Image (tube, rainbow, N blue to C red):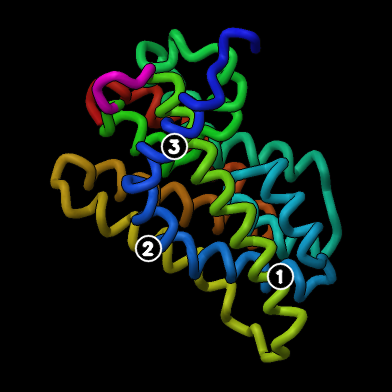
Amino acid sequence: MKNLSFKKIWLGIKAAFPITIPILFGWIFVGITYGILMNDIGYGPLWAMLFSALCFCGGMQIAAIPMMATGFDPVQMLIMSYFVNFRHTFYGLALLEKYKDTKPFKPFLVYALADEPFSLAVSANPPEGLEPKYYYFGMTLLTYIYWVGLSGLGSLLGSIITFDTTGLDFALNALFIVLFLQQWKEKGNRPACVIGIAVTLLSRIAFGSTVFLIPALAGMLIIFWLGRNKL
């Protein structure tokens, strides 16, 4: 820690702020929705922020809400979380070169490596004269603060403004639909999209509506690994 410069940390945050603004606006609805849904099942702002700070995996956090509401199964939650976030393993491999000299920030950078911070890290370059580790730390810290803060704000709004939240959890479905359509635009990605749909439908038929997700994710993982050179 003695080699760290708090002035450079501030400069890193300041330099990274402009490129994180689109993520902030993109997360407003999803983050607030997550907080409202957490409040709806009895978790106040502090709990919502704590969950976001410890988990920091927006899609899985929203997917976990109905599981928490109906009865917490830690084993199922652990397995599901692993498969849903398995892509983060490849994120880490892709950033080995960029993050190789980021100590002592590296543990936090790895911990908070989600989809959006990853997309920023691979596309953005630190400004001239600023050590990359301060830039990457500032960028990741800001996105982390955005998500945690929006989760708390959503839960607070949910406790103040009482309304019917039926259908609000469709925000996650809408997010995944948009991501799917973005992938479908690229012809090279369409075979993988079709495989994903087919495996999910077969798992739904074979395992039922309550436990089909984990077999579907496992099936897709195996198929994509076996066909990694062709898909």
Q: Do the residues labelled 1 and 2 touch (CB within 8 Å)?
A: no
Name the residue type under label 3: Met
**Helix, strand or loop at mark 1:** helix
- In percent of width and height, residue 103 lies at 54, 12
1 vs 3, front mark: 3
Whether residue 199 is visible: yes
Answer with left or right where residue 161 lies relative to residue 227: right
In front here: 144 or 126?
126
Q: Nearer the viewer, mark 1 or mark 2?
A: 1
Real-space CA distance between mark 1 and mark 3, rounded to the nearest whole angstrom: 25 Å
Q: Where is residue 24 in the image (x, y as percent from the top left)?
A: 44, 57
Left/right placement of residue 164 relative to residue 186 reads right
Residue located 42% across and 32% down the image: 11
Mark on residue 155? 1
Which residue in the structure is indicated by mark 2? Answer: 177
Task: Please report the residue visible at 61 percent of the width from the left and 20 percent of the height from the top.
Answer: 107
Task: Look at label 2 and name its amino acid.
Answer: Ile
How far separated are the C-alphas under marks 1 and 2?
25 Å
Circle 3 residue: 139
- Identified at 56% across, 15% down, the residue is 4
Given the image, on which type of amino acid does mark 1 rest?
A: Ser
Disc 3 element: helix
**Rendered location of residue 156, percent (x, y):** 72, 73
Kind of element beneath mark 2: helix
Magenta stretch: give its range.
Answer: 127-131
Residue 120 image offset from top left, x and y in percent: 34, 37
In the visual, does 103 lie left or right of 184?
A: right
Q: Does the magenta segment cover residue 164?
A: no
Q: Would residue 207 be seen by someone viewing this image from the given angle?
A: no
| Earlier residue among tags 2 and 3 | 3
